Amino acid sequence: MDERAADHIEAFLDGSDASPRRRAGDDKRVRRPVELDTRVDWMAALRQEGARHARYGRAASVLLIELRGRPPGAEADRIARTMADVICAAARETDRVTRVGALSFRLLLPETRGRAARSLVERLQRAFRATPDGGSDDLVLTIDVAAAPRNGSLEDALAEAELRVAATGTLAAAIETAVPNG
């Protein structure tokens, strides 16, 4: 049981009129930072949100976050940690984040429609540009939104977005090899 549910149960049992969020002196309401999920946990959460969308029509979106460029190995890990920090700082407690590649992340946004997900994309881009790595000309941040349509599945929307990201990556690789440096 999560902390919020425990607070609500406690308030109900105590007969308190105040919402657990509004009680004076309640220091337990500090927002905990979001942490990266394992791929297995993230996939389980994706299946659960996909089922909720199919069954109840609940909104859900996924952000596909890719950093493209040619940073060296150790630098790529540092940049990935920076990006993970940016994502986790912007994510809600209910959002699920995982790293799926060297410079690739997925962010599951339950109860979030496409417009709100695109708003988060803008915030993530601004936050990453504000970091020392964000100003580098060698890195390109690409974020695609997969929002579950009313009559479609979250999994299908994610598959389509994965194809778009892969096509963009192929195009970027083709441009990088066709244009000589210098």
Image: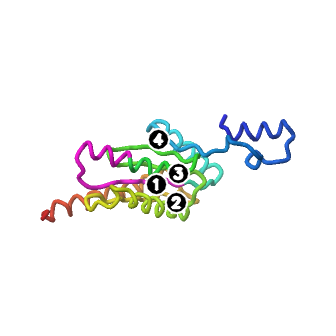
Q: Nearer the viewer, mark 4 or mark 1?
A: 4
Residue 72 at what x, y percent from top left? 22, 47
Q: Residue at x 46, y 51 (%)?
A: 87
CA–CA distance in space, label 4 to label 3: 11 Å
CA–CA distance in space, label 4 to label 1: 14 Å
Q: Which residues are magenta?
A: 61-81
The residue labelled by disc 2 is 117
Question: With 21 as the anchor, is 153 left or right in this view?
Answer: left
Upstream in the sequence, badge 1 or badge 2? Answer: 1
Question: With 24 as the anchor, is 149 left or right in this view?
Answer: left
| SS type, badge 3 | loop
Whether tag 3 and tag 2 are in contact, CB under 8 A, the answer is no
Q: Residue at x 42, y 53 (%)?
A: 64
Residue type for callout 4:
Leu
Residue type for callout 1:
Leu
Q: Say few, some or many: other residues with alpha carbon within 10 Å of mark 2 (under 14 / 14 to 19 / 20 or more).
A: many
Q: Residue furthest top?
A: 1
Q: Say few, some or many: other residues with alpha carbon within 10 Å of mark 3 (under 14 / 14 to 19 / 20 or more).
A: many
The residue labelled by disc 4 is 36
Please, which colouring scheme is shown? rainbow
- Image quarter of the N terminus: top right
Whether tag 4 and tag 3 are in contact, CB under 8 A, the answer is no
Residue 126 lies in the magenta stretch: no
Q: Nearer the viewer, mark 4 or mark 2?
A: 4
